[in-house]
Amino acid sequence: MTDAPDHACLRCIVSGTVQGVFFRVSTRDEARRLGIAGYAKNLANGSVEVIACGKVAALAQLQDWLHTGPDLARVHTVSCEPLTMRHYPDFQIL
């Protein structure tokens, strides 16, 4: 991952029915398809945290995708904020 001006990092919290519905696996697959690195992690409150770093255009596509997620998910809210640039080797499930 580079610190180029067209690259950024986001932290998104996705709430709704997003645990137990393959949300993290599907997010990983979508992020890797888009060339995004970072991770998806279940939180104790039932939401999913997504840290995503990559090209700004790809991050926008991932943000759009997070509002729907996989077929079994029922997303209520997606809240994203910018992060300082971080470096991850690929996209992982934590």
Image (spheres, rainbow, N blue to C red):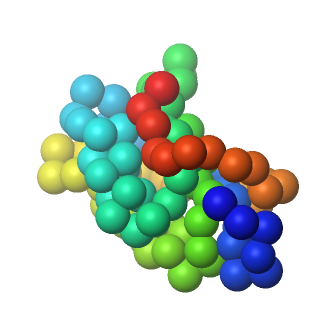
Asked if residue 78 lies left or right of residue 26, the reply is right
Residue beneath the point at 49% across and 47% down: 90
Asked if residue 86 lies left or right of residue 53, the reply is right
x and y percentages locating residue 83 in the rendered image: 78, 54
- Please count the marks in the image: 0
Asked if residue 72 lies left or right of residue 57, the reply is left
Can residue 40 be seen here? The reply is yes
Above or below residue 34? Residue 91 is above
Q: Is the N terminus in the top left, top right, bottom left or bottom right quadrant?
A: bottom right
Most foreground residue, 81 or 35: 35
Can residue 74 be seen here? The reply is no
x and y percentages locating residue 11 in the rendered image: 66, 50
Residue beneath the point at 38% across and 57% down: 32
Residue beneath the point at 75% across and 50% down: 86
Above or below residue 41? Residue 52 is below
x and y percentages locating residue 54 in the rendered image: 59, 66
Q: Quick one: which residue is furthest to the top in this view?
A: 44
Above or below residue 59? Residue 15 is above
